[in-house]
Amino acid sequence: MPAISPEIPRPSAAPGRSVRTTWTYTLGSIVFVLVVLDATLLSLAVESFNAQYDVVSSLLVLSLLASVVPQIRYCWFLRAGLGGGLPRPLWTTALLVPALLVWLLGLFAPADTLMWALPLWLGITLIACLLPLRPRMTVLGAGLVVSLLHPFIYSLINGAHYDLPDNPGTRMLLVYAAGMPLLILSSLWWWGIVVELDRHRLLAAELAVAQERLRFAADLHDIQGHHLQVIALKSELAERLLAGNPDAAREHIHEARLIAKQALEETRSLVSGYRETVLENELENAREVLSAAGAHCELTLDPLPSSPAARNALAMIAREATTNILRHSEATHAAMALVTTADCCTLTISNNGVSGPAASQPSSGNGITGLRERVEALGGKLEITMNAERFELQASVPTKGTLA
């Protein structure tokens, strides 16, 4: 079984809610089975104690109780995954010492002796899951040998032949205990797959953001690279012609100034989002980023407003809303809708999974405040509503001119 460790360096984001839920279910199932086995074993120990009130039976019950607590607590360390490494030696010692005491006292108990090897077997199983593959197999093999030696040593000490128990409940207990390594290893293997998938999901989200940055850098390079090269060429020609032909040099300098002005305007247009396709690109990029982050994103688009200022404001709102969704929520569903009428253009962005202290004051951030001022300057309005776990941002700007 491959060892998938979740301790690989992760992107700078918290695991998704579904990942934490998966671990809760995994831990709960392991703890539940262990509690059932320990409770059954403890009831048999109490039955043996009621049959005869002796020192061995009393110590056996107490040792069994002492072994249950660290055994259940040790399950929390399994979150490190297969081969994730052992915790502090103190925890491992607390797990093995009471179980070993039960193993020794069980040699002198009148009940079915193989049962008293189960606490030690379960403890060894938990330890083996945190070890690499080869040591894991070695420890499990050694634990199996030590458990099976118990009835033989019991026979030598008491001079009696040991037979398998006739009680169906006791046999079922032994069968379930024998299958515990398979149960825990398969659960941790599945947990490791979930963690690995979540890590790739977060990486995909960061790659989507990096891809958007590269796209912006490429656009900026396309604008500046050509213009700067022409400006450099014009300046060099003007320098050469300055002494012999001042009029031609003056013409080249004039052209270089115009090209520099054009480059500045195009750069401002790029940065401010004045291009006609910026709003559409922002919405498409927002959908890609949210989808890569694990949220199902729906996008509905009407014709874009013709006003560059309106498109720029809505594009900035889409960008800020996407950032807030990624930063302040654990959204599994998001929706973006651009509705254009004869009077106004309305952009609505909503998501679920609102969590954290930032969710209680959604309108207090500087980004939202700046966007509200930008929209109000155009004669529009920006509204934010939140109920239960759903957050909605709605921005409306007047429609000017014809639709794009």
Image (tube, rainbow, N blue to C red):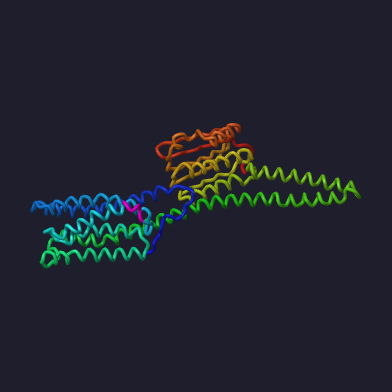
Q: Quadrant of the C terminus?
A: top right
Count every numbered label the image shows and give the total.
0
Which residue occupies 45% across, 43% down? 329
Horizontally, residue 357 falls left or right of residue 143, namely right
As displayed, is residue 192 above or below residue 373? below
Q: Position of residue 38 (x, y in %)?
A: 21, 53
Horizontally, residue 263 falls left or right of residue 18, namely right
Q: Which of 318 and 166 lies nearest the eye of the viewer? A: 166
Q: Quadrant of the N terminus?
A: bottom left
Horizontally, residue 372 falls left or right of residue 81, namely right
As displayed, is residue 141 above or below residue 72? below
**Magenta stretch in the rendered image:** 86-90
Q: Which of 154 and 291 lies nearest the eye of the viewer? A: 154
Which residue occupies 25% across, 49% down? 69
Q: Position of residue 308 (x, y in %)?
A: 64, 40
Q: Position of residue 56 (x, y in %)?
A: 13, 54
Which secondary structure dominates the residues rendered in magenta?
A: loop
Q: Which of 142 and 232 lies nearest the eye of the viewer? A: 142
Res. 291 in view: no
Which residue occupies 42% across, 48% down? 16
As displayed, is residue 13 above or below residue 399? below
Q: Which of 177 and 360 lies nearest the eye of the viewer? A: 177
Indicate whether residue 404 is drawn in magenta. no
- Residue extending furthest toward the left: 52
- Residue extending furthest toward the right: 244
Res. 382 in view: yes
Indicate whether residue 87 is drawn in magenta. yes
Q: Position of residue 394 (x, y in %)?
A: 51, 37
